[in-house]
Each structure stands twice: as C-alpha cells, then as structure tokens.
Amino acid sequence: MPKNADEKRLKILETAKRRFAHYGMAKTTMAEIAKDLSFSKALLYYYFPDKNSLYAAVLEHVMEELEEDITTSLKSILSVSESIVVVLEKRMEFVKKYYYILEYTVLMRKDLSSELDQLLIDSFESQKAIIRDVFRQGIERGELMDVDLEEISKIFLFSSMGMRLVVVKDLKSSFIPDKEEFDAILAMQKKMAAIFIRGLKV
Amino acid sequence: MPKNADEKRLKILETAKRRFAHYGMAKTTMAEIAKDLSFSKALLYYYFPDKNSLYAAVLEHVMEELEEDITTSLKSILSVSESIVVVLEKRMEFVKKYYYILEYTVLMRKDLSSELDQLLIDSFESQKAIIRDVFRQGIERGELMDVDLEEISKIFLFSSMGMRLVVVKDLKSSFIPDKEEFDAILAMQKKMAAIFIRGLKV
DNA sequence: AATTTGAATTTTTAAAAGTAAAAGTCAATT
DNA sequence: AATTGACTTTTACTTTTAAAAATTCAAATT
C-alpha cells in the first residue's frame, strides 16, 4: 500500500518539522523524532536516507508552503506597492514561525552541506522570481519604468534581506529575536520598499 | 619629552595597523609588533593598557581616516546622487584596503569585546551622520522630498551595508573576497542608491 | 515483497586534561 | 619618565576519552 507509505513519510516530515522549528537541526535527534511518532529509529532511515536529507525535505516543504502562500495572496491583482508589502509580510510571518528552519539556516550557511546550500540558493531564486513577477506586472501595467527585471529584483531582494542581517548580532546565542525586533525590521523593509518602488515609477 | 612619547605611540599604532590589516587581530601578536619596531614587548604595554585597546585605537584611527576622506571629498557641493556615489566608493576603497580591520571586525562582531563593539556602533553612527548630511542638503536644496532624515539615512545605510552581508558566504575562511566580488557589490549598491534617491526626489 | 525493528557499528560531539604560545606584569635599569 | 628582561597568568590549541547520536543490517513481521 504505497498510499499508506506516503502518509507515513509525511508524518515523519511533519514531526521533524515541529522539532526542527523548535530546537533547530543540531539539537534534534533522530531518536527523538522516532519517539514522538512511536516508530523505530530505523524506520526513519527507511523513508529518508539520512538526517540531512530529512532536514532538506523539511526545509523544502516550508519553502514551498511560503511560496504557495505568497502566490495565492498575489492572485488578486494588486498594485506593485501592495504586492511587495504582501511579500514582505508573509516572508516575515514565516521567518517568525520557522525561525530555526529558515533564518537560522541562512545564518549558519557557512557550515552547511552542499545539498542544503543548494536548497537555500533555490529558495533565494524562488523569492527573486516572485519579486520579478511583481515588478514585471508593474511594468506591463505601465506603473513602473522599463528596467532590467533580473537586476532590479536581485537588488531589491539583497537590500531587504540584507537589512535583516545588519541587525542580527548574536549568531552564536541560539536565541530567537523577539517580536519587537522582527517588527522593527519589517517596518524598515516596508519603508525601503516604498521608496524603492517610487524610484521605479514612470 | 612628551613630543617624542607621542611619536612613539603613533609608531606603535602604525605598525600595529599594518599587521592587523594584513593578518587580522587574532593572528597578530604583541611580540611581533614589538619586534617590527625593535621595541620590547613591555614597552607596548607602557603605551597601551592591553592588546584590545591597541586594536581599538587602530580601528578608531582607520575610521577617522575614512571619515575625513569622505568629508573632504564632499566639500565641493555635489548633487545627492554624486555625493552618495562618493560615499559608496570611498567606503568600498577602505574596506578593500583594511579588510581585516573593517569588514572582518564587523563579521566577527559576535565575539567582540564590548569596547570594540561600541566602537563599531560609533562608526556606524558616523557613517549615518554623513549620509544624513547628504540627504539634508538635498532637501534644503529642494532636490529631495522632506522626509525623516534620521529614519531615511538609517534605512539607506542598512540597505547598502546589508547587500554586502548577503553575499558574504564564508565567515570562517579568513579569505579576503576578490576584487570582482567587491566591484559587483559596489555596482549593486550604486544602482540601489540611484533608485532610492530617485524615490526621494521631489 | 514491502515494512519494521532491536541490536550492533561507526561517526560526531563534548568534556577533560595537558601543553604551547601569547598576553600581561613587575622589579630593576637607563 | 621610559624601557627592558624575566616571570606569571591566560588563552588557544591538541590530544584523549567518553558519551551520544547517526547509520547500518540481519532478522522478524505484515
């Protein structure tokens, strides 16, 4: 029964996600995940070749969730400004929710397996693609100047993600930044976006 | 002869600066600095209470040099765009030249003494003040909209510095990024600045 | 045949202990 | 006051060891 097998795989994925989101990859053991599910540890290895792959699958899962969430919200035609605000807000919402999975992974990028590193790059590209589409629509609608979409979306993404990084102080201390900090960053990102978009207006 | 004493202090500062810029703080020993100068190690401690203070003095020295350099270049009245380009270029020039002292210190901020951390904060403030003045003149000249200067200069600085951080991959490997990378960042920063400033135009 | 597991094996991580190098001190000297 | 050589204290690096966690696998179950 492959259906059931897929279900089991998903169960593992979800349980792992909960653990990873709470404690991060390093402080989550395969034994703990197995225990949560009342599975044997070995069964996890039947469904996932290793811990790294499991983590990668979780990361991918979260990324897809974010991407779908944003895409759905952008279905109704909005102005460029409104769309960008949606993107920034959704992104921050996810960063808060899955801090250890998303941002912490980025911060720890230096000691990441190439597999995970590639996933991060992919997710970055996917974020850029979303931004690019928003800008493209803006251009098509005659709202924005005709610019190099690829370049502009990259610059925008670097700026807004970068703002976040400037503020991060303690990579070491595995504390999650508090709500105030997240909100302050988001406010800055929105303000920056508003000016940036105005600078692209026809 | 206090004059001579001050000279000696400066000599130490300069020698230390050369070492620190080349090898970074961790890989520079007090003994090496002393040897370069043919002084005894103990003499360094006569002029500076400890290694950290010496490093802080060097950092401060470099920061002042950068600040003066930028301020001088901005003496002749330029447009906001031109001024910002000057700031970005000078800053990058210094980052290249004193990589280990400037950027590396920022990247290693997490394990910095509070004394040094404060210096970084100060230098950040000084950079922000420069940007603020540029924008202020732009507003006074009627070139830019009337905005919250403090807020806007902070956002601009976070964006441009942040772009740099997004690109940095290996905090660990103590390699200096190559010229291409510096140039690519600078190009992005300039492009971002152009759009940002356009977004602030009256 | 596809799942599942307990037990065994290998790899990582973490703590402890020891060692070498560098930081920092100080009494004596110029 | 400026300077130093010799001395002490810290810190950073290795090595060792033990424990924990990852991974494998032969056997059992469905």
Image: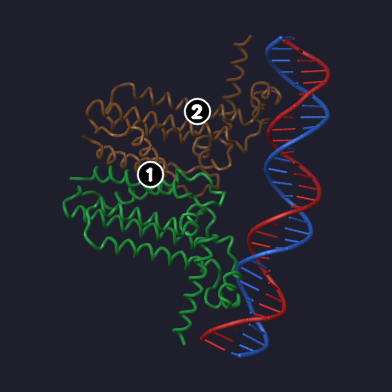
Chain colours: A brown, B green, C blue, D red
Q: Is A156 above or below relative to B77?
A: above
Disc 2 target residue: A62
Q: Left of A172 or right of it: where is B69? A: left
Determine whether the residue tagged by mark 2 lies in a helix, strand or loop.
helix
Q: Left of C7 or right of it: where is A165? A: left
Determine whether the residue tagged by mark 1 lies in a helix, strand or loop.
helix
Disc 1 target residue: A184
The tag earlier along the polypeptide, 2 or 1, is 2
Does the residue at mark 2 contact the one at mark 1 (Cβ under 8 Å)?
no
Q: Nearer the viewer, residue D21 or B86?
A: B86
Q: Is A101 above or below relative to A2?
A: below
Considering the image in quadrants, where does the C terminus of chain B appear? top left
Q: Nearer the viewer, residue A124 or C15?
A: A124
Which dot, 2 or 1, sits closer to the camera?
A: 2
For the point 38% across and 62% down, the residue is B66
For the point 35% across and 63% down, the residue is B67
Q: Residue C27 occupies which quadrant of the picture?
A: bottom right
Disc 1 marks a residue whose amino acid type is Ala
Mark 2: few/some/many CA within 10 Å (<14, 14-19, 20+): some
The residue marked by circle 1 belongs to what chain?
A: A
Question: Residue A174 location, x and y as percent?
Answer: 55, 44
The residue marked by circle 2 belongs to what chain?
A: A
Question: Residue A129 location, x and y as percent?
Answer: 39, 29
Question: Residue B64 location, x and y as percent?
Answer: 39, 65
Q: Left of B74 or right of it: where is A181? A: right
Question: Residue B30 location, x and y as percent?
Answer: 59, 69
Disc 2 marks a residue whose amino acid type is Val
Q: Is A25 above or below relative to B3?
A: above
